[in-house]
Amino acid sequence: MSAPWKSQKDSYSQALKYLKQRQLGTIKSIKTPWHKFNDATLDGLEWNTIIVIGARPGTGKTVIADQIVREAHKLNPDQDFRVLQFQFEMLGRTQAIREYTSVINRSYKYLCSAEGVISDEDLDKCYKYSQNKVAGSKVNIVDNPCTVAEFEKIILTYYEEYQKPILVTIDHSILFQKAPYEKDLQEMLSNLGKTLTQLKKKIPVLFILLSQLNRNSDNPERAEDGKYSNYILESDVFGSDALLQHADLLIGVNRPAKQKIKFYGPDRYIIDDDKTLVFHFLKVRNGEPRISFFKAEFEKMSISEMITPATQSKRITV
């Protein structure tokens, strides 16, 4: 039996090899569509890491993950990788229609002829996009819920099939099926965290895991203007005790207008529309926590960057 330890020299050698490969550009991060996001991370999403995005329903966390996937190969043309989406929450058809909205720049309702009848011209654009996308597609979808053990087997089988790095998205964590030996959701999430960590040590993989927030994030006092409690905290992410220790990057996304917040946080950022999103980079293993602002265009299923809003002159100390 081999010893369970290794020399520190091995770690130093592996680190130097990694730095050299980064210098030469043979190893790169996966760039996202947003400069602010890339700047908060290692110039994009680093391989062999776990990203957890927590938000309330209707905030846009699925749109964020979908846009990263939609633009991943275009923004990283010199990287050869696959994408595997665990889409437990919505039908594959629904996800495809949401993607078409961003392509033809029209709303989901319009595409479904619920906001006027979709034109033949726009429908033809969807057909052509689909044909081009499918022809060179490197994206696969798993839409049947599974247990954590089944998930691990799927990932390893997929890697064995393609022998390429894999960008994995999971929408979302609590929709995994609980195995008979798991007494509750917390134990299932704990097993999920352990499994993700084991997998990132075995194969070239990058996980984007979507999560809900705990109910206490909706307490009325947290919607009072100008309070620190407006912010998303680490403890707000559902299953944070189970997932936080495994996450390399933890992001809490807030949409202040949904809670009628007009002056956000102790700096009292002025929220003047219902499309403003606040990304709280809560845990950045290789960087510093920060707050960044984005704009949601839900009718087009896309997120764009925006300048940091002005603050109200009066700052309240809490």
Image (tube, rainbow, N blue to C red):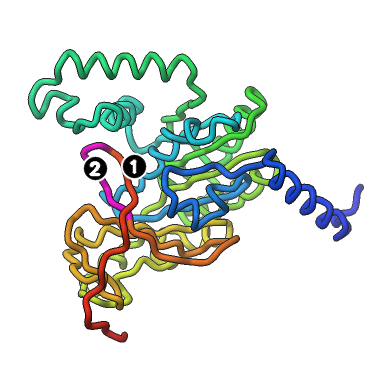
Q: Which residues are magenta?
A: 294-300
Q: Amino acid at mark 2?
A: Phe
**Which structural element holds mark 2?**
helix
Q: Which residue does the image show at 19% across and 33% down from the upper left?
A: 107
- 154 and 250: which is toward the camera: 250
**C-alpha separation, residue under disc 2 versus residue under disc 1:** 8 Å
Image quadrant where residue 143 sits: top left
Asked if 8 appears above or below 114 in the picture, the reply is: below
Q: Which residue does the image show at 59% across and 48% down from the upper left?
A: 46
Q: What residue is disc 2 on?
A: 298
Residue 185 screen position, x and y as percent: 45, 53
Please identify the quadrant where the C terminus is shown. bottom left
> Is residue 192 one of those drawn in magenta?
no
Residue 77 screen position, x and y as percent: 54, 30
Q: Is residue 158 left or right of residue 102?
A: right
Q: What residue is disc 1 on?
A: 63
Asked if 113 appears above or below 204 in the picture, the reply is: above
